[in-house]
Amino acid sequence: METVHVGELVRVISRHAALGIAVLAFFLGLGVAASVVPQKTYKANSVVQALPVSTGTGTGAGTDTQLAQFVIPGVVEEVSSTTFSQQVAVKVLAGTADATLSATNDPGTGIIRISATSHSADAAQRWASEAAKLLVAGTTVSKGTLDISLTQDASTPAKPESPQPTPILVAAGMLGVIFAIGASLGAESIRQARNVPSELRARVGIPVLGEVPRVAGLRRPATPIDRVLAAGSPAVVEAFQSIRTGLEIRLRDEPLGSIVVVSPTAGEGRTLIAAVIAWSLASAGRDVVAVDADLRGADLHARLGAQRREGLAEWDRYYASSSLLQPTALRQLSFLAGGVPHRHPADIITAALPQVLKYCQSAGALVVLDSPPLQGVAETPLLLSEAAAAVVVLDVRRRSVDELEAAVLRIREHAEVVGIVLNRVRRRRGATQPLLVRQPALPPATADGSETPRPTLSRANG
């Protein structure tokens, strides 16, 4: 769960003060209504004491006490009965409001508390007093068993039992503050989701290549990228096309031999974007080699419809051998799997990656590297330093703009960042409906009508 610092929270509340005040006022209004609108209820209490009546059988006081304790619960239940209430109603003055009677007994004692609840304070007092007097006079249950005496007669209650304004208003105020803070944080989240690209671009001076919306099923690593493109929503395909266009423009201005796709932490969509970049640039006619350099959690092969087998980890044993490169559905796209690490990934990257880059780039191929996350992984800075440029993938749901900026600046310490991809972006209402353009499964044909031959990297062998 994302941590919100006190200083940032204060800034958020200040920025959305009007919304917070409105929410707080709404809850306080509910509290006032709950304190004023409901009809007031008053409660009066009388207290009687029930002592055992000696049976005169000579069995002892203990037996009489046990008998009394057995009878008292029956007396308590009798007070709450309809019959008892009818008997009390005869005693109270005509025109007195109705009341509800109840009784409780302090366990282990003969103390019985009689309560009368009514919408009239005077009625509550009269009903509680008459009920106590009726008990003292003796009832069907208590006669001959209990000697009941009045300990405390009921008095007219000065304050209603309910509603109680002070607790209600305090609770309403507390809920109002909590919901006001929540509303401010929610409004800030929406504001950031709408303004992240422009704010991030202004802060770090790096173009945002694409904004990939949140789409169910897009995170499934086993779905090949060609199926994602074929069945994806227009917004997703348009975002992928935007990433490709931004990179194409950069590659025309400054040719790059390798691009590493990296993110600060795991689970931000890095592998998906690496597959998108490799596939889209290859489908445009570029020779591309996609390298799964995430030796700790390699799954780029699934996105490209390839196999997880020997690759980067074994390159130092098969140097300059094209047998480790796998074909894909695109003629211009080859794939190098991560392989099975036989030593620490940092050692493998140090020894093998420079050779892989030299081998592929000598054949004129652009290398797209799927990197492990930067946080807590020793080999990622090595990958960043070896690659010509980096594309940073950021999950906008996880961070504020300040945290996104810090993540980009941290990665820029190790590599030149040519673009940022924002993943799982909230779609804005009223956005232009994107034009759906399907990526071709094969590169365009040559002028004479024949297919462009698949490039081979074997010329690097010589």
Image (cartoon, rainbow, N blue to C red):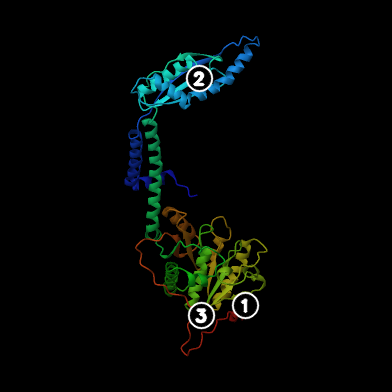
Query: Could you say where residue 266 lies in the image, as x and y percent from the top left?
Result: 54, 58
Q: Is residue 145 visible?
A: yes
The answer to whether residue 229 is above or below residue 186 is below
Q: Nearer the viewer, residue 23 or 379?
A: 23
The three-letter code of the residue at mark 1 reads: Ser
Which numbered circle lies on residue 112?
2
Q: Dot 2: few (<14), some (14–19), or many (≥20) neighbours within 10 Å?
A: many
Query: Between marks 2 and 3, how big is the CA–CA gap?
Result: 91 Å
Q: Which residue is mark 3?
A: 442
Task: Name the front one of labels 2 and 3.
Answer: 2
- The residue sitting at 34% across, 48% down in the picture is 15
Q: Nearer the viewer, residue 81 or 224?
A: 81
The three-letter code of the residue at mark 2 reads: Ile
User: Of label 1 and label 3, which has the lower sequence position?
Assistant: 1
Q: Which residue is mark 1?
A: 322
The three-letter code of the residue at mark 3 reads: Leu
